[in-house]
Image (cartoon, rainbow, N blue to C red):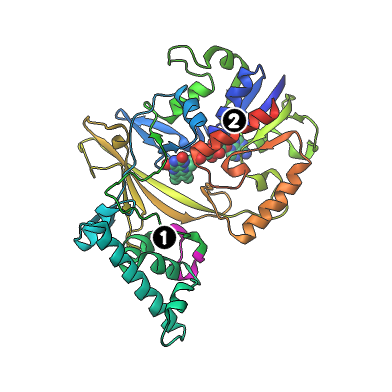
């Protein structure tokens, strides 16, 4: 069969692209090597609770067009992300704001908080400079201080208390090494808020799709039409075929494909264009080397007898000694009240080829390698490399949707 598009990956990028292509009358085959659609935003139902299978996903955006767009495929609730942090037996609000400072130091006013942070930051810089051999650091030395690593950067920006209780252990778990071995640029600045406001994001729009992200992606792919009939539905449905448990590299013999030419599957299907949202280095058979990632392991537990495990959707564990970085209690994303709850512990882990690639490691080595793959990709004019793996970049959901909509505008 002849298709206009082969969409590799039924994640958000693939779903949005396929939807728009289908609306424009293009025939699309969407494949995914997983047996589910929705990629990493996949949600599944357990005891009536939408479980975020690949980690907490909170939709937030400043992009008006993207916000209007997603409303067509889901009703969003008014969930506002207000995570908590646990350090030993102490409980703090995040992001760093007056509630955090007040709990940490027993103070009340922004002036007091600024004074403590300023004092602790200055003390930390003086100590670092002394350790570097500057016996009496001057104001000039202090204001021109440059951190050599993340430990120094964190201490100089936040001071000892906040850095040691809320940043250090969490960051070390995330990256799998000590802050003194990590580059300073990972933390450019810290979003201190000197108001009593626990809303984690600054974006004007935020929420969780009622009924889950999988249902939202089903609507995008025309597999579900339950939002009043005015959306996508019928036409998209006619133009999109979804095939799961199908790996692109088994579906297509890459040795037989040529840059700039239509792509042919082993079954003889032809595709004028391919939208590829898998790993870009895998597309080229890793011929220039592997791009690196950080991975995650999720440990999900159903608790039919527990109504409310932790009282909040997201609780971060900031001590190094606790092996997971956070616990998600999924029902709180939808203000769930019923019996039973489901929690997920999130463990960061080293990535090796074959593991699920969650976070790109955008260091110099990998960025240079990615740029070389991008140059290779230029001659494959029939392939659009999109999404977080195709572009080797951490994207939030709204950014991936924006990317897909822009690709649509460029292509038809
Ligand atoms: P994916 O969702 O990864 O989809 C790519 C798809 O391609 C996958 O289904 C994969 O199976 C398939 N595929 C890959 N290779 C092949 C192949 N060879 N053949 C066939 N199929 C293939 N964003 C937010 O906005 N808010 C959040 O709170 C948030 N939280 C996050 C938490 C975690 C732990 C992570 C990892 C990410 C989070 N994100 C969040 C980012 C969000 O997950 C991404 O923006 C989004 O999922 C990217 O969509 P995508 O389509 O690019 O990639």
x and y percentages locating residue 117 in the rendered image = 32, 65
- Image spot of residue 189 (x, y percent): 45, 59
Residue at x 39%, y 44% (from the top left corner): 201
What residue do we see at 36% from left, 63% from top? 169
Structural crowding at the residue carrying mark 1, measured as other residues with C-alpha within 10 Å and reported as few (<14), some (14–19) or many (≥20): many
Ligand 1 is within 8 Å of the C-beta of the residue at disc 1: no
* 54 left or right, relative to 162: right
- Left or right for 112, reference 225: left
Q: Is residue 187 above or below residue 67?
A: below
**Which residue is the site of mark 2?**
405
Q: Is residue 402 above or below residue 324?
A: above
- Where on the picture, by quarter, is residue 28? top right
The answer to whether the residues at label 2 and label 1 have Cβ atoms under 8 Å apart is no
336 part of magenta stretch: no
Image location (x, y in percent) of residue 385: 66, 39
Q: Secondary structure at mark 1?
A: helix
The range drawn in magenta is 173-184
Q: Quadrant of residue 101?
A: bottom left
Is residue 111 visible in the rendered image? The answer is: yes
The label number, if any, that marks residue 88 in the structure image: none
Q: Tell me how far mark 2 sits from mark 1, CA to CA.
A: 34 Å
Between discs 2 and 1, the one toward the N terminus: 1
Decide: few, some or many residues near mark 2? Use Cα within 10 Å; few <14, some 14-19, many ≥20: some
- Which part of the image, by quadrant, shows the N terminus? top right
Quadrant position of the C terminus in the picture: top right
Can residue 265 be seen from the camera position used here?
no
Per the image, the residue denoted by label 1 is 171
Of discs 2 and 1, which sits in the foreground? 2
Q: Toward the viewer: 11 or 231?
A: 231
176 magenta-colored? yes
Q: Is residue 223 above or below residue 348?
A: above
């Amino acid at each position: 069969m002849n298709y206009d598009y082969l969409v590799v990956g039924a994640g958000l990028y693939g779903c949005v692209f396929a939807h728009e292509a289908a609306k424009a009358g293009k025939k699309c085959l969407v494949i995914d090597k997983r047996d589910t659609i929705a990629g990493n935003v996949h949600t599944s139902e357990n005891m009536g609770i939408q479980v975020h299978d690949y980690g907490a996903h909170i939709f937030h955006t400043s992009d008006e067009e993207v916000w209007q767009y997603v409303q067509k495929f889901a009703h969003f609730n008014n969930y506002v992300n207000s995570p908590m942090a646990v350090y030993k037996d102490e409980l703090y609000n995040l992001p760093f704001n007056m509630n955090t400072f007040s709990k940490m130091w027993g103070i009340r006013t922004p002036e007091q908080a600024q004074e403590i942070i300023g004092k602790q930051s200055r003390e930390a810089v003086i100590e670092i400079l002394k350790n570097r051999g500057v016996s009496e650091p001057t104001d000039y030395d202090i204001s021109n201080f440059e951190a050599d690593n993340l430990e120094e950067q964190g201490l100089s920006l936040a001071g000892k208390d906040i850095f040691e209780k809320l940043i250090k252990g969490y960051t070390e778990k995330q990256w799998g090494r000590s802050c003194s071995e990590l580059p300073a640029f990972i933390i450019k600045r810290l979003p201190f808020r000197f108001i009593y406001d626990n809303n984690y994001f600054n974006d004007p729009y935020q929420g969780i799709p009622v009924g889950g992200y999988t249902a939202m992606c089903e609507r995008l792919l025309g597999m579900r039409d339950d939002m009043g009939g005015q959306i996508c539905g019928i036409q998209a449905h006619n133009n999109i075929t979804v095939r799961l448990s199908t790996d692109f590299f088994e579906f297509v013999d890459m040795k037989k494909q040529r840059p700039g030419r239509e792509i042919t599957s082993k079954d003889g299907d032809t595709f004028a264009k391919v939208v590829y949202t898998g790993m870009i280095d895998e597309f080229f058979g890793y011929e220039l080397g592997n791009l690196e990632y950080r991975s995650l392991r999720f440990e999900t537990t159903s608790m039919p007898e527990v109504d409310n495990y932790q009282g909040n959707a997201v609780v971060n564990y900031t001590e190094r000694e606790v092996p997971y970085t956070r616990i998600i209690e999924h029902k709180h994303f939808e203000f769930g009240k019923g019996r039973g709850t489901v929690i997920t512990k999130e463990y960061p882990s080293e990535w090796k080829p074959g593991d699920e690639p969650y976070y790109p490691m955008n260091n110099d080595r990998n960025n240079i390698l990615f740029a070389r793959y991008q140059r290779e990709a230029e001659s494959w004019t029939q392939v659009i490399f999109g999404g977080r793996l195709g572009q080797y970049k951490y994207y939030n959901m709204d950014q991936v949707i924006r990317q897909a909509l822009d690709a649509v505008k460029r292509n038809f």
